Image: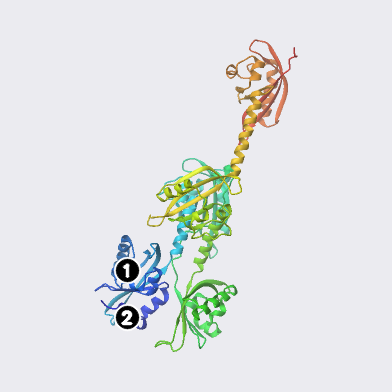
Amino acid sequence: MKDLSKEFRQAFKEDDQCFNFVQEEALDGIAYREISGDKGFWADPRFWRILAIKPRRVKHDLDFWHAQLKAEDRHREQIAFEECIANPAENAYDLVLPFHHNDGSLVWMELKGRIIESAKLGGKRMIIAFREITELKRQETFLRHSSEMARIGFYDWNIRAKKLEWSKVTKEIHAVADDFKPDYRQAIKFYKSGRSQQKITELVDRALHHGESFDEELQIVDGEGKEKWVRAIGIPEIKEGITIRLYGLFQDIDMQIRTQNAIRSERSLYRQVLEGASLGAWDWDIDADKMTLNHRAAQMLGYELEVMRREGQIYWFDLIHPNDKARLHKNLQNYLVGKSDKFEMECRLQRSNGKYRWLSITAKLFQPDLHFERPRLVGVWKDIHFEKQKMDYYSTFIQETPLAIAMFDKNMHYMDCSNKWRSDYGLEEIPIIGKSHYEIFPEISEEWKDFHQKCMEGGTFRRDEDSFIRPDGKLQWIRWEIRPWYNEDSELGGLIMYTEDINMRKEAQQKLAHSQMAFEANFTNGAIGMAIIGKDGEWLQVNDKICEMLAYTEAELKTKTFQEITHPDDLEKDLTELRKLEAGEIKNYQMEKRYFRKDGEILKATLAATSVRNKDNEVEYYISQIIDCRPKE
């Protein structure tokens, strides 16, 4: 089998296609592959180091490389390879694949391939550039599961294309099928007629015509006819003064609104993952202190290369953000003197418009040899500005979400958590990422460990009310849920745990229960007659005293209305006051009146009445207090 590593080095020196592709794309390794023949394959040490595979174990053949992939991914890679070979103009070799790390975990890589052809090479070859994106995949997985746990969906309306997309959670909130395809008019109709529908229409109109964002709590009527509160966040995207896109978040806050324990989400969640960008190359002759850049590097800073040379700005170290300069020089010095084995960092460089842009900088030191007369530091820039913004959004969401959420791997080691989780459990100053949950909480019960184990087997568990004794001796009430999370291959990745402090709700429930008990006691055992009267005058509930006063049993009274046993001369006055009470003109009334007892005698009494209203301010029932005014014997 040919030594493809030597052939690649020769191609790199002599073939512009090869040189340009590697310069633009290769960040975390390169590979060189035969198109036909022996199916030869060679990958450079950077790729194998990322997988922690020692050089002596590496076999430079296609089968060994394929062995680092799952069977289905090998098949997918081979199909993409063959399609690219058959028609490279139509079928780009551009893949995202998970490789097996030596420790058993998965390392996600972005692969980009380019076909080169040369008579000197004896045929066609493919160069493959690798970029590791494992961290982005992990963040994406965490956020997807967090949004489902927190009931936060998102939407994206491409106005020019007239295309509206809802996420899975957004569809669940609207109670529509997974294949439901919304449009703008349908989406607006889900909002409750009246204030909510008028408000969302106004907010969308201002977003479209004035570029204004919005964040509003509104009511919808879902596909099952149920009213619920939602939080709608909208962010317009403007191009040349015209809104071309409206996107944002959609959160189910129905429970929070109704229980006054509102859960807020403070930041926008973005779904798309950075696909990559071209590289800028630079070369620093250390002894001569001479810097050269390629055209792409100049473009990344907003310059034409010739303008940079003319204005003396090739020495890009001068463009580093003041807050990053000391750190870069320290890292660079440590690398040059051998204190670190690689130089890579992220920092900001100033563009021609005065604004700073985030770049990923990597470099390698070349000692004098056949190619270089003096030591040189050769490196590349990768534009990661949007990626940094995305990571900031991710970090902000994770840190500032008002939910206590934590994500664990299969060994119950922390992968990420919200600030609310840290504050609720006193972990603000403790580094927990990567540590075992059982190390952080050694006192955790066997019952909880059993829940965790069953969750790892695919179970989902929740309790709307649970309590435990905190270290300070206080009783803590929580609502919690744990569920497994899965990676993109539907393999178990670990579990996500969510907890909510419901102490305030429990205290309110307890106060309400005590109040009801006190009312029941006073009602039943009161020294005066008490009754709950329906809107039509029916006796809904009476105490023993009123039965004694009117000489009826409770069952007998409940078959009558107060009108039936009221003296005719007193009835109209009583009904007049009752109508005023119903209309809200008065809060209560009191009058002297006469009732007919069961035995035919007349009971002279003082009546005091008031109303109890529902949330719509409509009368539910009346409460009457009746005092016997007959002379004492």
Q: Quadrant of residue 580?
A: top right
* Place of residue 166 in the rendered image (x, y in percent of width and height, measured from the top left): 46, 52
Residue nearer the viewer, 2 or 127: 2
475 is higher (above) or lower (below) than 127: above
Residue that badge 1 annotates:
65
Q: Nearer the viewer, residue 204 or 148?
A: 148
Q: Residue furthest front?
A: 443
Q: Secondary structure at mark 2?
A: helix
Residues 220 and 610: in front is: 610
Query: Where does the image place residue 20, in percent across and percent down from the top left?
Result: 39, 78
The type of residue carrying mark 2 is Lys
Residue 51 falls left or right of residue 439: left
Q: CA distance from mark 1 to mark 2?
A: 18 Å
Residue furthest top as drawn: 600
Q: Going by the image, does 434 lie left or right of 79?
A: right
Amino acid carrying label 1: it is: Trp
Q: Are marks 1 and 2 in contact (CB under 8 Å)?
A: no
Residue 143 vs 252, above or below: the answer is below
Residue 6: image tag: 2
Left or right side of 388 for 547:
right
User: Is 29 on the left or on the right of 254, as rendered?
Assistant: left
Residue at image location 51% in from the left, 69% down from the top: 385
Up-down: is 573 above or below 180? Answer: above
